Amino acid sequence: MDVNTETQVDQSEEADIDDELIVQEVVGAVGKSSYRNVKDILQYLIPDLVQKKILNPYEPIIHFWISGDGRNVGRKVKHVMITIAILDDKHTLNQPNYHYTTVLYPGCEDYESLLNITAPLYRDLKNLTL
């Protein structure tokens, strides 16, 4: 997915990631973003959550936690990541391995960029409720 977001470089900010190999890969990916369909994530997770009796197969409601945050990579590129977690799985809610990335893009956390990049996520969530 190509994204038209402005890359902001602020040399005075401290880098969250400073491994030069990672920084070079990130700089090369500027303008590209990735999106994982929520439905695909759920198709992977639901059988295990039903088997563990976290989800009831007869109650078709799953509670999500959608969150996002930005990071600086090598003081060169800001990245924004949006994740979902299953609130019904209370034992793993605070573990990062159980937060599933749906959107990852290089850019700023500004309203216009977020509106543009989250449109597929919004559409998929709306289709889940039908």
Image (spheres, rainbow, N blue to C red):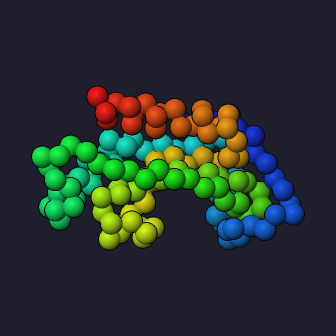
Task: Indicate the quadrant where residue 94 lies.
Answer: bottom left
Q: In this view, does 96 lie to the left or right of 78?
A: left
Q: Where is residue 23 in the image (x, y as percent from the top left)?
A: 69, 62
Which of 57/24 is in front? 57
Q: Is residue 76 left or right of residue 116?
A: right
Q: Position of residue 81 (x, y in %)?
A: 56, 52
Seen at 39% across and 41% down, the residue is: 37
Q: Position of residue 46 (x, y in %)?
A: 23, 52
Question: What is the quadrant of the N terminus in the image?
Answer: top right
Which of 9/86 is in front? 86
Seen at 53% across and 37% down, the residue is: 118
Seen at 77% across and 57% down, the residue is: 76
Which of 77/119 is in front? 119
Question: What is the quadrant of the C terminus in the image?
Answer: top left
Q: Is residue 65 above or below residue 110?
A: below
Q: Residue furthest right?
A: 12
